[in-house]
Amino acid sequence: MRHSDQLAEFTRDALKAGHSRADIQQALRDAGWDEQEIRQTLAAWVDSPFSPPIPRPRPQLSAREAFFYLLLFGTLGWSAWHMTTLLFQAVDAIFSDEALRAWSRSSMRFSIASLIVTTPVFLWLHLRLSRDVAAAPGKRRSPVRKWLGYLAMFTAACIILGDLVSLIYRLLQGALSMPFATKSAILAIVATAIIGYFRNQIGRDDDA
Amino acid sequence: MRDFLMPAAITSLSAIAIVTGLIVSGGPARGRAEMRDTTRVRQISDAAHHIRCLARQNENQLPETVAPHSNCPDRDLFTDPFSGGSFTYQVTDSRNFRICTTLELPEDQRRNYLVYGNNRSYDQDSGCFIFDYNP
């Protein structure tokens, strides 16, 4: 039997036996269980005098939900990539005396086309999923939503760290130029917006 | 409101990127002009091959005018495929010739759009492509 199963079984048996939540909490604390584990295991049961104890609905992974969340994350990732690429090339064009190369213009047009398609799709998916969550708050506990959210925040955080390191390195090397600083700022803004988006989404899930 | 703030920020960033990109790269009209110029330059390259073919038939002398020859099939390479105007052919010396046309892209931006072969270069002032002939 798994560690968490033992804890869940004990909690259910204790509630069924009529012990108060405070007593169960104290008993588990005395046994060395972590405060968060105790809180989570008690939160899995509805606080009601009804016996046997009523389990709260558990998060479930549905293929439909996974499809929508993967599409949301995919479109956001695609948008962020092309947003950054496009603005980087615009910076190159603005700060350079030379006219843009043919491949640069072609690449910019591909990025524009990508953004025209992916950004509205991302926005539509966000609104749709927000409506779903508002109608059924239990969906906030979706594991795919949490995992993808944290993965996106991790990636964005790594990008910000890398961005800062290269900015400071360039500064120390005496090679910090205006185009480079502008590109660093663009990268930081896009990555921060992504972190902000997921913090707003997942942060509220954690509160739920 | 809180739910919409960050998606709105991301969408705004995307809109800024699109507008900036369109301003910098040019819109569809500019894209079409690039395609037309690229086609013209490709056709000029074919015309130069044709001139070299005629020169080989002419005892390795560059021809003064472009005339049809049975060994060098003429594909009307000296007519602009879009404007209907003509490309101009000039012999500059025994080993060099030029083919001139009017391109649409602004002068300072042409060079980055034209792919040059080993023995082809572009004279921006005259709008002529310069070729050499080494028998």
Image (spheres, coloured by chain):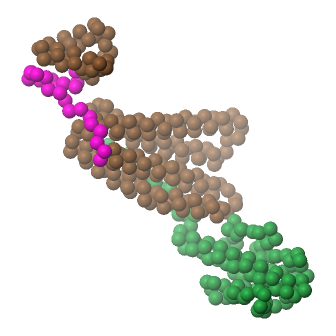
**Residue B33: quadrant of the picture:** bottom right
Q: Is residue B52 magenta?
A: no
Q: Is residue B93 above or below residue A6?
A: below
* Quadrant the N terminus of chain A occupies: top left
Percent from the top left, x then y, of residue B124? 76, 73
Percent from the top left, x then y, of residue A194? 44, 43
**B43, A155: nearer the viewer:** B43
Name the residue: 49% across, 45% down: A190
Numbered label tally: 0
**Residue B31: quadrant of the picture:** bottom right
**Residue A45: quadrant of the picture:** top left
Q: Which residues are magenta?
A: A42-64
**B16, A153: nearer the viewer:** A153
Name the residue: 28% across, 10% down: A29
Horizontally, residue A157 falls left or right of residue B42, namely: left
Examine the rendering and report whether any part of residue B7 can be seen. Answer: no
What colour has chain A?
brown
What colour has chain B?
green
Name the residue: 66% across, 84% down: B80
Magenta residues: mostly which secondary structure? loop
* Quadrant the C terminus of chain A occupies: top left
Q: Is residue A44 magenta?
A: yes
Q: Is residue B104 above or below residue A34?
A: below
Name the residue: 58% across, 63% down: A106
Q: Residue furthest top?
A: A30
Percent from the top left, x then y, of residue A63? 31, 45
Examine the rendering and report whether any part of residue A125 can be seen. Answer: yes
Q: Residue furthest left?
A: A50
**A96, B80: nearer the viewer:** B80
